[in-house]
Amino acid sequence: MERVKQVLGPGGLQIPEELMERCGIKEGTPLIVELHRFLIKVFPEEVTKRDIEERALVYLLENVGDALGIGEPVQKDGRWVVPVLLPYAQRQVGELIFSTSGELLLQESSTPKQILEKVDAD
């Protein structure tokens, strides 16, 4: 996550193009802007399978470690479902669920603790 300080000007809020590109959002990308009290979320209208794969791998690396892999993401019931795999044992140890806009749905996904418990159960 990156943070930048911005000042609201007469034309509204402007996010530098360089910052958006570092987040994988290029000029011309359709965006969704969600306004909440004290929070603004900006994300692509729809993400690709590759985007979901990258987000899943980054999440696993940051929260579980580098010994796990993922299976092919599939769209099911309006969500992306990503199997979490233990490659050397060739078995599934959890799943990550993403919205079609690419947001990880933590309450629907396997937790890091649940994933690690399944890894250790081998």
Image (cartoon, helix red, strand yellow):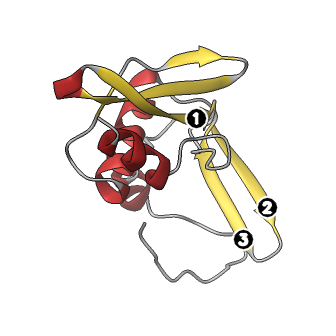
- Could you say which quadrant of the image residue 75 lies in? top right
Which residue matches tag 1?
97
Say whether residue 71 is left or right of residue 95: left
Residue 107 percent coordinates (x, y): 67, 48
Instruction: Answer whether residue 10 is visible to the viewer in this image.
Output: yes
Q: Is residue 45 above or below residue 83?
A: below
Residue named by callout 2: 35
Q: Position of residue 60 (x, y in %)?
A: 35, 47
Q: Earlier in the sequence, mark 1 or mark 2?
A: 2
Q: Are marks 1 and 2 in contact (CB under 8 Å)?
A: no
Q: Residue furthest front?
A: 121
Q: From mark 1 to mark 2, how far is it between C-alphas?
A: 23 Å
Relative to 12, residue 85 above or below? above
- State which quarter of the image contains the C terminus: top left
Residue located at (46% from left, 76% from top)? 3
Q: From the viewer's perspective, is 79 left or right of 49?
A: right
Q: For the view shown, which residue lies furthest in the right direction?
A: 37
Mark 3 surroundings within 10 Å by alpha-carbon count, few (fewer than 14), some (14 through 19), many (20 or more): few
Rate crowding at label 1 as few (under 14), some (14 to 19) or many (20 or more) other CA atoms within 10 Å. many
Which numbered marker is on residue 39?
3
Q: How many marks?
A: 3
Tell me if residue 24 can be seen: no
At a point 26% along the width and 53% down the height, the residue shown is 65
At 67% from the left edge and 79% from the top edge, which residue is drawn? 8
Mark nearer the viewer, 1 or 2: 1
